[in-house]
Image (cartoon, rainbow, N blue to C red):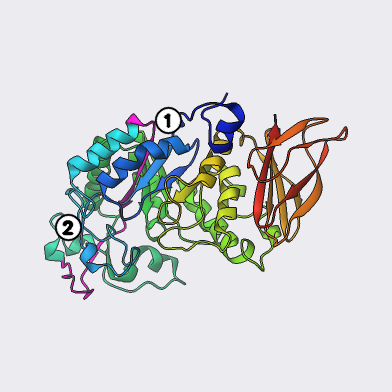
């Protein structure tokens, strides 16, 4: 059943765009805001819903050390990630009532709200662009005994990665019952304001046992979806955190897209089977870029991949406008056609063709010229419409094969008419 009508879909079916896309986190895609005031987010939510997203992700709501006076570019430094008081939700992005109003309007538009929760650390006491350092005495809810001893991280030592100080940020001692109580209250406050999901910031720097035994249990009890930011290219590391009961950011897939696939010298064969998404698709939070990690050269082609493939994709607001037409069309395709397991139908250095079994055939072309290829499908003697708008319609033959042509550095999305 059709959930909504996107850009090309509206033209094909002659139907108006619906508002909102789904009732549960994970059905469509997330639109991620970064360094955006709550009132500004609220003003765009109707458009977000009309695009076909099912959720938004927003920065941390708590009071933090830095503000826009300390900025040197929109991502330098990231605001909201140096907490001072986890109980004070009046922040650089707005007041607590403005935050609550944003959550309510998102729900009015059929959107869920995923929030960033910083549970690894508190603010640093360093000299940064005239920003006063935060000492232990400046933290209203914690004291020095609540933190691991100061030491820089040794990334060759897993225990150091979890217990030492990330870029000078005071590392919380999650083994402390008191610390856990404060963090649980923090999660509870988010839930009381009506949010639907939590992204655990810097999850790689917190022991897996904390998520397995505490944090994900708190979230489950509050009916909150969870995803951990596991900034690591090793699928096994990401899977270890996923096994605690949450989704994880698919950095293995991100690194494959950026470093091996979506650029002029790339190889699409590296994409086949890559990432968490091909191992645990229902726990893979896929993305093309964020404030820490820039996009591949062929950014839109990467979005065409994650928005038509398995996993739960996220679109980054600092790179993609809220009303982007290409993304709107891809979201329509995702919401209406892209279901079923992914099956590779052809892959070589430039061309990757996969089918969402029995529903959608996608072709991605990395080359500087168009590519044509005969591929097998699930359909016999079936007319297929290109819902991307990038190529003409085709028909499969009596043996279920079809020839598709994909424009240079572009994509096609075929499904029965």
Judging depth in this view, the residue of 146 and 126 nearest the camera is 126
Q: Range of the magenta residues?
A: 108-135
Q: Where does the image place residue 27, in percent across and percent down from the top left?
A: 50, 35
Check residue 127 for magenta coloring: yes
**Quick one: 416 or 11, which is closer to the camera?**
11
The residue that label 2 is drawn on is: 142
Return the residue nearer the eye: 264 or 244.
264
Residue at image point 20% right, 62% down: 65
Residue at 39% from the left image edge and 43% from the top image edge: 56
- Indicate which disc residue 355 carries: none
The answer to if 380 sits in the magenta stretch is no
Q: Quadrant of residue 46?
A: top left
The C terminus appears in which quarter of the rendering? Answer: top right
Callout 1 secondary element: loop
Does 334 sit above or below residue 67? above
> Residue 164 at what x, y percent from top left?
33, 68
Q: Is residue 96 above or below residue 205?
A: above
Q: Which residue is mark 1?
A: 19
């Amino acid at each position: 059943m059709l959930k909504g009508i996107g850009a090309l879909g509206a033209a094909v079916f002659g139907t108006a765009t619906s508002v909102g896309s789904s009732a549960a986190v994970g059905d469509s895609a997330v639109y991620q805001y970064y360094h955006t005031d709550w009132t500004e987010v609220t003003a765009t939510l109707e458009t977000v819903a009309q695009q076909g997203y099912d959720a938004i992700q927003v920065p941390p709501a708590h009071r933090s050390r830095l503000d826009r006076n300390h900025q040197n570019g929109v991502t330098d430094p990231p605001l909201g990630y140096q907490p001072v008081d986890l109980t004070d939700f009046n922040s650089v992005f707005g007041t607590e009532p403005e935050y609550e109003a944003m959550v309510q309007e998102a729900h009015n538009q059929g959107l869920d709200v995923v929030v960033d929760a910083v549970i690894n650390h508190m603010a640093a006491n360093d000299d940064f662009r005239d920003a006063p350092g935060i000492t232990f005495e400046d933290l209203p809810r914690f004291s020095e005994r609540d933190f691991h001893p100061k030491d820089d991280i040794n990334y060759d030592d897993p225990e150091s990665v979890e217990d030492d100080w990330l870029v000078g940020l005071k590392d919380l001692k999650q083994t402390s019952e008191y610390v856990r109580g404060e963090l649980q209250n923090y999660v509870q406050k988010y839930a009381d304001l009506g949010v639907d999901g939590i992204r655990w910031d810097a999850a790689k720097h917190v022991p897996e046992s904390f998520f397995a035994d505490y944090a994900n249990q708190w979230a489950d009890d509050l009916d909150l979806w969870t995803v951990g930011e596991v900034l690591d290219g090793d699928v096994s590391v990401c899977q270890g955190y996923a096994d605690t009961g949450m989704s994880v950011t698919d950095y293995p897939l991100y690194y494959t897209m950026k470093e091996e696939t979506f650029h002029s010298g790339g190889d699409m064969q590296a994409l086949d089977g890559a990432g968490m998404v091909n191992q645990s698709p229902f726990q893979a939070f896929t993305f093309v870029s964020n404030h820490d990690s820039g996009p591949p050269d062929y950014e839109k082609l990467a979005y065409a991949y994650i928005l038509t493939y398995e996993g739960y994709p996220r679109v980054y607001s600092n790179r993609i406008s809220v009303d982007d037409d290409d993304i709107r069309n891809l979201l329509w395709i995702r919401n209406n056609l892209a279901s079923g397991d992914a099956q590779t139908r052809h892959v070589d250095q430039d061309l990757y063709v996969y089918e969402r079994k029995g529903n959608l055939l996608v072709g991605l072309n990395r080359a500087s010229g168009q590519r044509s290829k005969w591929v097998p499908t699930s359909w016999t003697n079936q007319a297929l419409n290109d819902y991307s708008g990038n190529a003409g319609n085709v028909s499969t033959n009596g043996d279920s094969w079809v020839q598709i042509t994909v424009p240079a550095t572009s994509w096609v999305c075929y499904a029965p008419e």
